Image (spheres, rainbow, N blue to C red):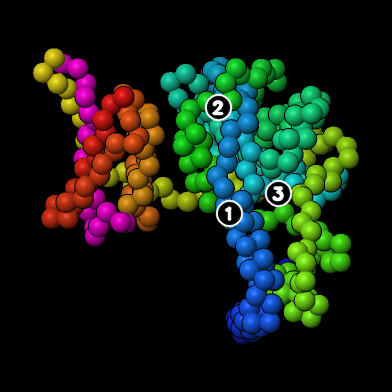
Amino acid sequence: MNTEIPPNQLLSQVNQFWSLLDDMAESSPQSYQKFIQRHLEEGREFMSPPDPHLCLQTKILDPEEHMLFINICGWKRVPCPESDGHPVPLIAGKLKDTSDGAVISIAYSPEVLAKADKDPTEQDQLIRLAMKYIEQHHKVPLCHSYRVAPFNLKGTIQQMRNALQATGVKPEKTKEKTQDDPDRSLLEQLKNMAVKGEDKEEPKKPLEITNKTKPKVGLIEVISSTELNEEEPLPSPQHELSVMKDNSGNPQTIILMAQLQGVCSISSCDLNVSKDDLMLEVPGKYRLHLDLPELVNEETVTAKYHKANGTLTVTMTLL
């Protein structure tokens, strides 16, 4: 069913929204400030990046047996199941091969993970949902025995976040139900406040997991995956990575030189450097991910763009 709002109706709603905000700002400045602050806080919380929760070790059995690390993460963009009979939502990154095994990151709602932490059986079922997803979507048989690793993340936090955020998932809010109207929109909230006034702050109900029973194995809702949201990969720019040494032969700095033809300024580049890897992105043009040969000091990284020859120079001091 097509639920897209017609442009004229959308414009009318936007105009009505701003009109109600203006009226509230004049008639009840305190309520206006509370309303804006509450939604800013909710927005910041919702846009926060995924965080590591635990890491699993198992094996891919075919075509060649090798280790698999599954990073189970919490991400506020992943909603809780709507009810006992609804699927458990998840977001998954790519299955990536490394020198010591394959790695994949899978995110659940933090509320779902917090509840599972209190019940080993429920935690086991969430783990098996993740394994089932990998078998179904990557067409690989897994060993169904696993162990929880002594560390909570395989790889770096930045690598995990890049893997999940690169899926292109559109944020989907979990519905927060209120006593008087469980599904009201932002516009409806404003209308209600304009009529009733907001003399005191509306009590906020925390997100709750409505499941009263254990998640059902195989009941999975995939919000996004690389298979379902396939995009043409961006090319890597021509680049050279050099390790500079002092007179004694000790490594001192790492220098990356990347040719970014067609880039007007450094403001067009998105550069992220962690202790052991580097991610460079120019939206719509280039994407470069490198594992660094030495650990670097993230605080001392400098970058300069030479517009004349289209060269970006990134200098990283070693730890």
Q: Quadrant of the N terminus?
A: bottom right
**Residues at marks 3 and 2, CA–CA distance in whole angstroms:** 22 Å
Q: What amino acid is at disc 2?
A: Leu
- Which marked residue is nearer to the observer: mark 3 or mark 1? 1
CB contact under 8 Å: marks 1 and 2: no
Query: Pointer 1: what residue?
Result: 44
Query: Pointer 2: what residue?
Result: 153
**Residues at marks 1 and 2, CA–CA distance in whole angstroms:** 24 Å
Q: Is residue 169 left or right of residue 178?
A: left
Q: Is residue 221 left or right of residue 292?
A: right
Category of crowding for the residue at label 2, using alpha-carbon neighbours closer than 10 angstroms: few (below 14), some (14–19), many (at least 20)? many
User: Eyeballing the image, is 25 above or below 104?
Assistant: below
User: Eyeballing the image, is 241 above or below 250?
Assistant: below
Q: Where is residue 252 drawn, in percent x and y?
A: 21, 24
Q: Is residue 33 magenta?
A: no
Category of crowding for the residue at label 3, using alpha-carbon neighbours closer than 10 angstroms: few (below 14), some (14–19), many (at least 20)? many
Task: Please give the range of residues in magenta.
Answer: 249-268
Identify the residue at horizontal 52%, vertical 25% (top origin). Answer: 154
Looking at marks 1 and 2 on the same chain, the residue that comes earlier in the sequence is marked by: 1
Q: Is residue 262 magenta?
A: yes
Identify the residue at horizontal 53%, vertical 51% (top origin). Answer: 168
Looking at marks 3 and 1 on the same chain, the residue that comes earlier in the sequence is marked by: 1
- Whether residue 291 can be seen here: no
Q: Where is residue 199 drawn, in percent x and y?
A: 77, 71
In the rendered structure, find residue 301 and report the number of the disc placed on it. none
- Which marked residue is nearer to the observer: mark 1 or mark 2? 1
Query: Pointer 3: what residue?
Result: 79
Q: In terms of image quadrants, where is residue 291?
A: top left
Q: What amino acid is at disc 3?
A: Pro
Q: Name the residue nearer the viewer: 236 or 137.
A: 236
Q: Quadrant of the C terminus?
A: top left
